[in-house]
Structures are given as C-alpha cells and as structure tokens.
Image (tube, coloured by chain):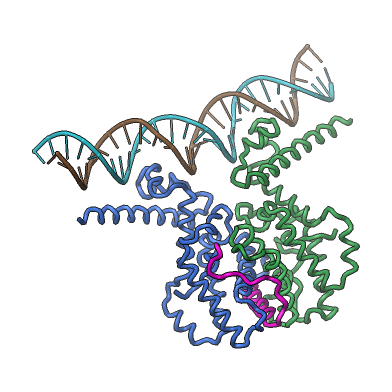
Chain colours: A blue, B green, C cyan, D brown
Amino acid sequence: MGIKERQERDREAVRRAILDAARELFVAEGFRNVSIRKIAERIEYSPAAIYSYFSSKDDIFFALAEEGFRLLGHPANEGRREQLEALDPLERIRAVFWRVYEFSRQHPEYFALMFLDRSVPRISREYERFAFAHETKRHVIAELERCVQAGVFPPTVKPVVAMRLLIAGLLGIAALRLSDRLGPGEDPDLLASDALDTVIAGLRAGVVLKSAEVDVACGPTDALVDQQAS
Amino acid sequence: MGIKERQERDREAVRRAILDAARELFVAEGFRNVSIRKIAERIEYSPAAIYSYFSSKDDIFFALAEEGFRLLGHPANEGRREQLEALDPLERIRAVFWRVYEFSRQHPEYFALMFLDRSVPRISREYERFAFAHETKRHVIAELERCVQAGVFPPTVKPVVAMRLLIAGLLGIAALRLSDRLGPGEDPDLLASDALDTVIAGLRAGVVLKSAEVDVACGPTDALVDQQAS
DNA sequence: TTAAACTGGTGAACACCGTTCAAACAGCGG
DNA sequence: CCGCTGTTTGAACGGTGTTCACCAGTTTAA
C-alpha cells in the first residue's frame, strides 16, 4: 500500500518546489517581479500545473507568509532558549522583541509579507492555520506577565496591550526602514533599540493605558506575534 | 496672448482629472484594481493619452502620495491653528502626532501609499518636490525643541529622534490596523492613544537614546513627517 | 491480460495588464 | 489657405493571472 504514500510524497515535493521557487524569486527580484509563469519555468512545469497545488497566486504568498511566521517562531540557532533562560525578566522581554526587529532585517521580504503588505490580509481570518503562532504568542504574554509579577512593570500594565505597544514601535521603525523613509544620518538599528527602550520605559512609568483587556486565546490574529520559543 | 494660458489650464485640468479618477478608483476598489485603462475610461480618454501626463502608472501614485502629504500637512479645518496655540507644549505635541493617526483612519489608502507601500519608494529620493513637507517637519521639530526647553522632556532627548519614535509607534498601530492584524476586542484607537502616551512617558523618563543627531534640513526623507501647520 | 477509471500535467485560449509608436488630428501663426 | 506644433489615438507588443478541454501514464477492477 505504499503507492498512496509515494503519490502524496511526490505531491508534497512539488508543492515545496513551488514555494521554494517563489521564495527565491521574490527575495531576489522583489514581490512585483514574481509571476506564475516564472515560477513555473523555474520548476520546469507548465503554469497551469501550479493551480492544482495553489488556488491562486495570492495563495502562494499566503503560504510563504505562514512560512515566515514559522521561521520567526522557531529560530534556527538552538542555543537561544538556554541563553534566554539566563536573563532576568526584563532583559528577556527585550531580547524577545528585539528578535522581531532583527527578523525584519534578515528577511525583509518575509517581514513585509507578514506585517506590512495589505494584499495578503486573509492572515487575520485563518484561525486554525496559525495555531502554532497562538502558542508562541501565549509564551510572550506569559513572559510579560512574569515582568508584571516581578514588579518590573506596574500591575496596571496588561500583557496583551504591552505586547502590542512593543510590537508597534518596532514595526514602525521596520516600516520606515523598509520603505526607505529614513535620512542618511539615521541608523534604523539604533532607532529600533531606542524605540524598544522608550516603550519599555513608558510602560514602567505607569501610564494609564486605556485599552481594554482582550481574550488572548480567541483573537483572530493570534498569528500576529510569535517570536522564538516553541 | 491668453491662448497659451488656456492651453496650460486645459492641460492642468486633464492632469487633475487623471489624478481624481485614480484617487477615486483606488479608494473605492483598492490599489490592486486600479489600471491605466480604467482611469482612461473614467476620464473618457484613451489609455495612451495618460502617458503624456504621467510617465508611468507609478508616477500617478507618486503624485497621489504627494497629494496625501499635502493633505496631511495642510488640514482643511482652519480653526486648528489657533486651537493649538492654546495648548501647553506637551498637549500640542500630542495633538500634532495624534493627527497622524487620525489621518490614517480618514485616508487609509493615502496613508498606506505614503508610509507603508514599498512600490512607491522614490518618495525618499525626491528632495525638492517635498520642500513643503520639510517646512512642516521643521515646525514639528521646533515644537519638540520647545518641549525640551520647557523641561517637559529631559535635555538628552534629541527632537529628531523623538519625532521618529513618536511616529514609529503610531505608524506601527496604523499598520496593524490597516493590515487587519488586530483581534476583535482590540480597539486600534485606544491602542494608538496608549502608544502615544507610552512613548511620551518613555521620553520623559529620560532613557538613554543611542541614536545620533542628524541634520534636519538635508535628510532625503524630510517628507516623512508633516502634519498641520504652514 | 485487458479494459476501465482516475490522475496530474499540458497547450491553447481568455481577458486583462502597462507601455510604445506611427499615424491622425486639432488648433494656431503666418 | 498652408504649414507647424503639440495632443490624442488605434493598434500592437510582450507580459500577466486564470481556466478548461484534452492527453498520457498510472492505478484499479474484471
């Protein structure tokens, strides 16, 4: 009964080849210059064949965005986790979020696909597909909760809100960098670091946050944040 | 000799018609669904005609982005300026930056074109065209300088850096909102307000900012921030 | 072993797209 | 009236995402 399995393997191999070709093309030549036909040529299939693996071109990039979330959530270097354990709660938060910015440097195209691009908005409506991201999100929130309990942040700080504010600052700097909106004397890395420090300081200062608490588990966009852990 | 003038007026009218049609189309149907041919049909010209007014499709959106900067820099309601004078320095900063977020709500497509979209990156390389924005940028920086002098911010806060950090936070929240990455219980308005308050509090807390000072006048991206004033 | 069913891949086509260019056209100065 | 100048056009080029009838190879059933 190995036939079905082999067929499935073959199918999966072609699927992977499509994704790999798409990824290579779009990191090499940018989003705009990727076409179904070029992908097809690269994997030596006809353009039509791709449509039996993905229902549309957007679907391919949606899958790539998923890949990006997985990449961000599950970093390559495995020393990270133990390394992280050695840090105090605040330093851990800083390291975790700094990784998001680092990711935007290492994989700008992925990052844009995941956080900036509005042409792949369905990310927010695919609950189950990003279940793995939900978990890493919970890790981050737990980490933030620990900070509150350790007295690093005042008890008025809701972890979910803090997470969004921290992300927003880095996301903003990353967006400025990626869309090439910074001056020549401005170092995006330093700005990102400053943004992180400033938001952390702001949270510690005990500003009254107006955002209501929100249920962590069932937000449709748990996919949003997921770095390291898992 | 009114002929030349009339011809010029006519030309300008067609140019405007193209921009208006493009704007209407892209706020109504989104960036993706705007084509030269649709614009041409809307203004009852042939597609080719458009190319004697704009050198490419991107050029049209570049012009729209410019329009957006002008819109953001020169708000419609004129009572704003006096209204602003009545506030203390910190409240003024808050009002000025809050307007950026409000703009992202009122004109999401413009906002995306101006700050998020990477398909119009030339914004950062068109010095003279955004001279008007440089001025409003200087206003904002002067406003921040006033805050430092008034003791609202510690003297370690460089206005340029502060501007970027404030923008980044709001930009991040706006990006999250526009790309539909927030959960159902999360109110982007409240988050934006919290982001603003948090960054301001962080700046006041006197974090050591690592970003170097940068020349204000000659950065290629002075176009970046310009709200009200002028 | 043979026939039938199914499968994945293909070529050709459709309806678009941005862009170019020779030709037609308009309105103006002489 | 003619020639000139600048605007507008139709047609075309090469590209795009996507669909669909068809075909060959493989699997299954008789």
Q: Is residue B170 above or below residue A140?
A: above
Image position, residue B57 (x, y; %): 63, 43
Image position, residue C15 (x, y; %): 52, 32
Residue at the spot x=55%, y=60% of the render?
A: A112
Is residue B54 part of the magenta span, yes or no?
A: no
Residue A216 visible to an observer of this rendering? yes
Q: Which image quarter holds the C terminus of chain B?
A: bottom right
Q: Residue B227: which quarter of the image?
A: bottom right
Question: Between residues B24 and B220, which one lies in front from this camera angle?
Answer: B24
Left or right? Give the position of D13 relative to A39: right
Q: Is residue A200 above or below residue A11?
A: below
Q: Is residue A19 above or below residue B212?
A: above
Left or right? Give the position of A46 relative to B36: left
Range of magenta residues: A191-220
Q: Residue D19: which quarter of the image?
A: top left
Is residue A208 part of the magenta span, yes or no?
A: yes
Image position, residue B81 (x, y; %): 88, 61
Left or right? Give the position of B215 relative to A134: right
Image position, residue A30 (x, y; %): 52, 54
Q: Is residue B140 above or below residue A42?
A: below
